[in-house]
Amino acid sequence: MADMTLTRGALDRDRLLRLSKEYGVYAGVAVLLLFNFVFTPHFLSTENFRTQAVQVAPVLIVALGMALAIGTEGVDLSVGSVMALSTSLLSLYLGYGPWVAVLMAVVGGVLVGFANGSLIAFVGVQPIVATLALMVAGRGLALVLLPQLKDVRDPDLATLGSGDVLGVPYLVLIALALALLVAFVVRRTTFGRQLLAIGDSPAAARLAGLPVRRVLIVVYVCSGALAAVAGVLATARLSASDPTSLGNLMELSAITAVVVGGTPLSGGRVRIGGTVAGAVLIQLLTTTLIKHDLPPSWTQIAQAVVIVGAVYTARERGKR
């Protein structure tokens, strides 16, 4: 009888951990929404929801690239610096036209991603070390190109940052379109299957003849490009280029969104739907703390607690 009770308790605990990993992020979003509905004044307004959606869009776009990197059992710490570099390049090339400037900003992100991927795939540098180096170098280069804040005054970029379709901001539409695109790539393409296989076991992927180096480079190029797009959109929304602060600690928010969304740090799996929900959770958490007069530093502490909880749940699940 005692053995049956212990077995039942272990099964219940395993089931609870599994449910927490699969659906915990959605439950967290629901709880925060309910809390704000009840205790936060003026939360139920169209303008507030629009503001929340616009603010979460860059985080989501960066998190999509981070999810790909983590899916290969890697990480990309350079995403915040890529955002800063993209805003500097955007401002620098704006005189050639807004779309040339946007293109150059994205190219900058692609080059950083290519450098990250090459260091990891060909040199054998650990992802955390390679991307840390580019994080420092990228922010430094951004400040060399644009040492201080500069206004960005262009009607096309202003429309991109503040325009909408049927009340839905362009930024939100772009973020959702990219989320659908990345989800399709991961689930329905050969590249997506190769990415997951590499994350599950790089050695086995090499023995199977998969193009491991090429896939890793493409993954980090995609992460850099997505971070650059996020930087462009954030610049368009703010109508200013500020490489000093833009993208600051964005890697923390992106990693939190991905891990809380159910993508394991051990690689081999990418949950795009969970990543979207994770980005929304981080935004709601930040909003809740701010609207209840807690200092911004508490947001970082809360994110750290959420990451530890999500990693612990995944670790316990992996033991079973």
Image: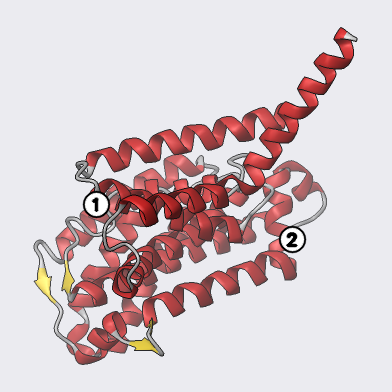
Q: Position of residue 9 (x, y in %)?
A: 77, 21
Q: Callout 1 environment at 10 Å: few (<14), some (14 to 19), or many (20+)?
A: some
- Give the residue drawn at x 38%, y 63%: 56
| On screen, residue 217 above or below 309 | below
Name the amino acid type tagged 1: Lys
Please state the horizontal and vertical placement of residue 6, each as a whole percent of the image. 81, 14
Numbered circle sitting on residue 193: 2
Q: Amino acid at mark 2?
A: Arg
Task: Evaluate whether residue 119 shows in this view.
Answer: no
Would you say 210 lies left or right of 22 here? right
> Is residue 7 found left or right of 131 in the rendered image?
right
Q: Residue furthest top?
A: 2
- Image mark count: 2
Is 26 on the left-hand or right-hand side of 162?
Answer: right
- SS for tag 2? helix
Residue marked by disc 1: 291
Quadrant for residue 188, please give it.
bottom right
Q: Secondary structure at mark 1?
A: helix
